[in-house]
Image (tube, rainbow, N blue to C red):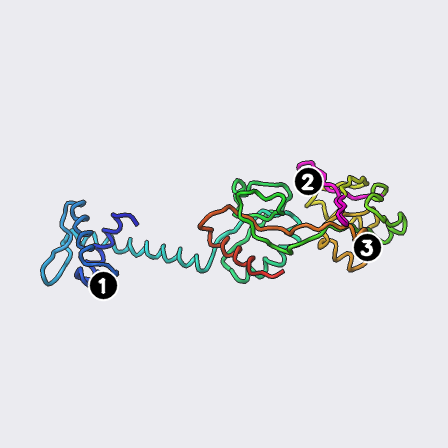
Amino acid sequence: MDARMDDLSAFAAVARAGGFRDAARARGTSASSLSEAVRRLETRLGVRLLHRTTRSVAPTEAGQRLLLSLVPALEQIDGALEQVQASRDLPAGTLRLNVPVAAARLVLPRIVPDFLAAYPRIRLEIRAEDRFVDILAEGCDAGIRYDESLEQDMVAVPIGPATQRFAVGASPAYLAREGRPRHPRDLMRHACLRGRFSSGVRPPWEFARDGEVLRLDPQGPLLVGIGAGTDLAVDAARSGVGLVYLFEDWLAPYFAGGELEAVLEPWWPSFNGPFLYYPGQRQLPPALRALVDFVKQRRW
């Protein structure tokens, strides 16, 4: 509150209390500071606002007119400040997140229901895509990424499993027909179902074992857009078209159900799990602060 608002608030307090001492006691300040504030206001306006005697203080006619307009305005300001304070304790509003499709499928379902139950006044807007974006330019409050694509000026909080793996799977029918690969290089002779980012990049299939790392570019009959087309590749693998390379957690239900069989499991590479990231700011929006604290307390 600037000096003019302080002076107006001081005048209203004195006029309503009927004296400087009572007003000072209620506001936790000194009578002399309130007297000085009223004097500044009267000087600025060029009119006397209070009649002062040794026994009492009362508004002049001009002071009474000012008080009638001023009190509702001050009450409205106090109410607005109380709402802001309450929103800090009970966060509300829309929280926009930009996340990879894999995170929307594998991580957020384990967070979103409980988070929204805990904070019913928050509305989550999830934008799932697999292109790298500037979250601020896109109008988002935060995002989820893996550490290799995090920007250095962002604050990052682990969200989801600390470690994940890529897995290879194929249907029993495909393996019975084409044989089971015994080494990653065998994939170069198999039908591999590939993915491509919207940028045009086709990520290699990476494998690691006993310090040996292999990056392969196998070929196959199907190329899908990573994210929106990933389920199509999984369905094709389940139907016996070829082998699919994807997050282990994504393929796990199909391994468990027998629709896919794990292939080359000793070579599956592990990597760090995803991070919730956001711009480094001292004062986070209340809804984002609530999500950050919620994620930090979560056990995976």
Q: Position of residue 5 (x, y in %)?
A: 26, 50
Q: Amino acid at mark 1?
A: Arg
**SS for dot 2:** loop
Q: Is residue 65 left or right of residue 165?
A: left
Q: Is residue 233 left or right of residue 73?
A: right
Q: CA distance from mark 1 to mark 2?
A: 67 Å
Return the disc, 2 or 3, that comes first in the chain's sequence: 2
Return the disc, 3 or 1, that comes first in the chain's sequence: 1
Judging depth in this view, the residue of 184 and 241 nearest the camera is: 184
Q: What range is drawn magenta here?
A: 190-213
Q: Look at mark 3 in the image and give the residue it sits on.
A: 261
Q: Position of residue 59 (x, y in %)?
A: 15, 56
| Rendered residue at 37%/58% (across/down) | 82
Judging depth in this view, the residue of 20 and 185 nearest the camera is: 185
Assess disc 3: are there few (<14), some (14-19) or many (≥20) residues with their C-alpha within 10 Å of its C-alpha: many
- Single out the mark in the foreground, 1 or 2: 1
Q: Amino acid at mark 2?
A: Phe
| Rendered residue at 45%/49% (across/down) | 282
| Rendered residue at 40%/55% (across/down) | 84
The quadrant holding residue 72 is: bottom left
Q: Look at mark 2 in the image and give the residue it sits on.
A: 197
